[in-house]
Image (cartoon, rainbow, N blue to C red):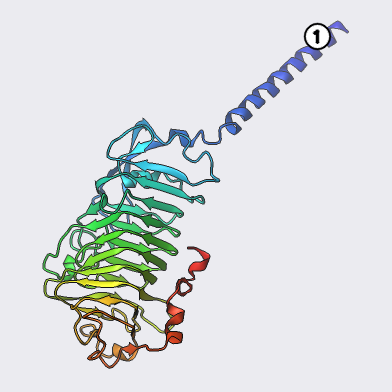
Amino acid sequence: MSLLLANVSMASCRGLLVITLCLAALQVFFTEPAHCISTISERHVERSSNWAGNYTELKISSSQKLKGILANSGNPSVITVSKNEGQEVFSTVQAAVNAVPANNMHPVTIDVKPGIYTEKVNIPADKPFITLVGSGAQNTIITWNDSAKSSAGTYYSGTVSVYASDFVARDITIQNSYGPGGMTPDDQAVALRISADRCAFYSCRLLAYQDTLLDESGKHYFQDTYIEGAIDFICGNGKSFYKNCELHAIPLENGAFTAQKRSSRSEDSGFVFSNCKLTGKGLMFLGRPWGPYSTVIFADTYMDDIIFPEGWVDWPGQQGSERTVTYAEFQSFGPGGEEKGRVSWCHEVTSPNQIAPYLNINYIDGSGWL
């Protein structure tokens, strides 16, 4: 009997030991949900030799960054980018983007401190809900100098490329410093490419010459944003609403503000400019059709004395699209806003009821995401 009791006692001790070890393991994994995040390392951007469709390659350094950055997923997490490196601070915007977990479902703010960040930035499709906030557009600049010739084509020349939905940028400058070149197709140089849905930009500056803003696809909102270029500098097939924005022309000879690419009647895209300003030098067309169903509307917009009287021009080699485009103005004003002399295939809208559906965020289903 004593031997039996001894065996039972030893078995009980072993059982208690196993239970204790299991509880300890559970404590390690569940008392600190941010443990794995706390070891995220700073990633330094290294350019790949081929940018065609590839995202930035990364080197992982040994320094620990962003301890517990996503510990509280109920509130927006904040990642800091600064030229003054320190603990829990990234030195490049791309490194901060890559610190956001793949398939992220929580709001993340990337707070970019003043400085000039010379880099190319890609926001991949599996990292939605990122907000990029600068310290004032004049003080916070992301710049690069690719062109169609130096990259894999115009679409890959962008300084910042957004492929993730629900992206927001505030108070920051995005620049392509390539310059005008010879203003050939090889010299197209995009500052910002947006190929994602539900993206918004507030008080930003977008600077380049040719194809400054590639508003490629999706629904987008721009407010109080300055966009500068020479030709086709707002282009693409997005469905976008521009409110209180300034479009500033710096043409070498003449150019066009827009080149919207709607290709068929069934596509749902177009650019609407409300309470905007068209400024600059030289002579400019309001737009030309990149696609045969190109759709652009200017409403209550001030225009400097830089607008060709015709207002709009057809795409070279694509004559006939004037029968299918939707180009319209409503209450343009300023020295260039005189609508007499406009081409016969544009529309002068005079009825507020007719223009009303285009002049609020419902045009981009904004009440559901803005």
Location of residue 298 in the rendering, given as x and y in whole percent from the top left corner: 33, 79
Toward the bottom, the furthest residue is 344
Residue 138 drawn at (x, y percent): 25, 53
Q: Secondary structure at mark 1?
A: helix
Instruction: Estimate how packed mark 1 is, as few (under 14), some (14 to 19) or many (20 or more) residues with alpha carbons within 10 Å.
Output: few
Which residue is at 40% across, 66% downward? 221
Quadrant for the N terminus in the image: top right
Going 21% across and 85% down the picture, which residue do you hit?
317
Image coordinates for residue 17, horizontal then vertical, percent: 69, 18
Residue for badge 1 = 6
Choose top left, top right, bottom left or bottom right for residue 195.
bottom left
Above or below 333: residue 193: above
Q: Is residue 100 left or right of residue 225?
A: right
Q: Nearer the viewer, residue 318 or 324?
A: 324
Residue at the (29%, 44%) spot, across then down: 45
Q: Residue furthest top?
A: 2
- The vertical placement of 120 against 241, above or below, is above
Task: Name the amino acid type tagged 1.
Answer: Ala
Up-down relation of residue 196 to residue 92 (above or below): below
Q: Is residue 50 left or right of residue 244?
A: left
Side of 84 where 16 appears, left or right: right
Residue 76, horizontal then vertical, whole percent? 49, 47
Question: What is the quadrant of residue 316 in the picture?
Answer: bottom left
Does the rendering let one see residue 76? yes
Q: Is residue 127 visible?
A: no
Outermost residue, front side: 334
Query: Which residue corresponds to the image point at 51% horizontal and 67% vertical from the top-left?
Result: 367
Q: Quadrant of residue 303?
A: bottom left
Which one is nearer the viewer's eye here, 63 or 255? Answer: 255
Question: Position of 242 compared to 370: left or right?
Answer: left
